[in-house]
Image: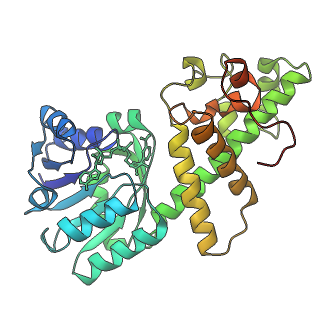
Amino acid sequence: MARIGFIGLGNMGGGMAANLAKAGHDVRAFDLSAAALEKAQERGCLPAASAAEAVEGADAVITMLPAGRHVRDVYEGSVIGKAPTGAILIDCSTIDVATAREEIAKAQAAGYRMVDAPVSGGIAAAEGGTLTFMVGGTETAFEQAAVFLEAMGKAVIHAGGPGAGQAAKICNNMLLGASMIATCETFALAQKLGLDPQTFFDIASKASGQNWSMTSYCPVPGVGPETPADRDYEGGFAAALMLKDLRLAMEAAQSVDAYTPMGAHAEELYTRFAERLGGAGKDFSAIIKMIDDSWRAEGAAPPPPPGVKI
Ligand code: NAD
């Protein structure tokens, strides 16, 4: 079995590192948080005193960090030049496309193979080993990385060259954010027009309005399969993380001069919901509460009046 340096043992990385240890790999783990490190040790990983120590003698280095700046700091400060050049470097964090490409270019210049491999699926999928990985990098780097990613996920897809994994991830999540808002406002309107939500669900899920945000992740409690809406929007995919991904998508759109009006509006609405109305920690489908007025009924700051540009 292989020796793996794993850096970033938070909500996602904790479960992923534990699954690698469970698969029989020798996992040398590091996190700035002592509590996260202790938990990883309880779950079969060997704690390292630093990121540089974790990657010593590694066959693979895997990182699961909050944002681009953390990825840059860790790779440039503790991985490149510290891990053996034969090690495959795998960044699973969701970060901006530009930083992903820069770090891969720097790693390649130093003689490494590296991929960006962001994930779809939340904390439960990280724990259960059922993540989907979207991988950017050369064919050889992809093949070398896939062996390790398969122990943490149900699907490993080669999206294209360096940065293509991040591009696929933010394009998918921009579509998801915009489709969730469209689904929420549609249910709010249907209800105000006197339609029963379950009846509307039954019709629209078989008609041309059908989409994943409605049929698999319905934002209305008690309608469709069980979703975070049935648990007062707890768990699931936090609105703060949806906002992070929408911001990355807008940054990427600007960098290539792409016109993304729905993505831009979704970013504005999630900014309002997550940062001004206190919805950051709720599942992203809770934005329906801002749209259908129920947030106001609970005593929070009022949503924008209909038709007002925000
Ligand atoms: P998290 O904040 O729970 O974990 C990040 C961990 O990185 C923390 O434990 C932190 O201490 C550690 N860290 C930060 N800087 C470090 C450094 N220099 N050295 C070592 N450790 C360092 O975040 P998370 O929810 O696990 O998310 C990780 C990544 O996965 C993010 O990029 C996020 O966007 C992405 N993601 C998250 C989810 C989700 O549902 N949580 C889903 C898909 C993708």
Q: Residue at x 44, y 73 (%)?
A: 161
Q: Residue at x 69, y 33 (%)?
A: 214
Residue 158 spot, x, y in % from top left? 44, 63
The image quarter containing residue 109 is bottom left
* Vertical comparison of 157 with 236: above or below: below
Task: Report how many numbered discs are placed on residues in the image.
Answer: 0
Q: Residue at x 14, y 48 (%)?
A: 27
Residue 11 is left or right of residue 38, and the answer is: right
Residue 302 spot, x, y in % from top left? 73, 30
Residue 68 spot, x, y in % from top left? 39, 62
Residue 198 is left or right of residue 112, and the answer is: right
Q: How is the model colour-coded?
A: rainbow
Q: Residue at x 35, y 39 (%)?
A: 126
Q: Is residue 296 visible?
A: yes
Q: Nearer the viewer, residue 278 or 120?
A: 278
* Vertical comparison of 38 with 83: above or below: above
Residue 282 is left or right of residue 300, and the answer is: left
* Vertical comparison of 26 with 96: above or below: above
Q: Nearer the viewer, residue 165 or 275?
A: 275
- In this view, the residue farthest toward the bottom is 109
- In this view, the residue farthest toward the right is 193
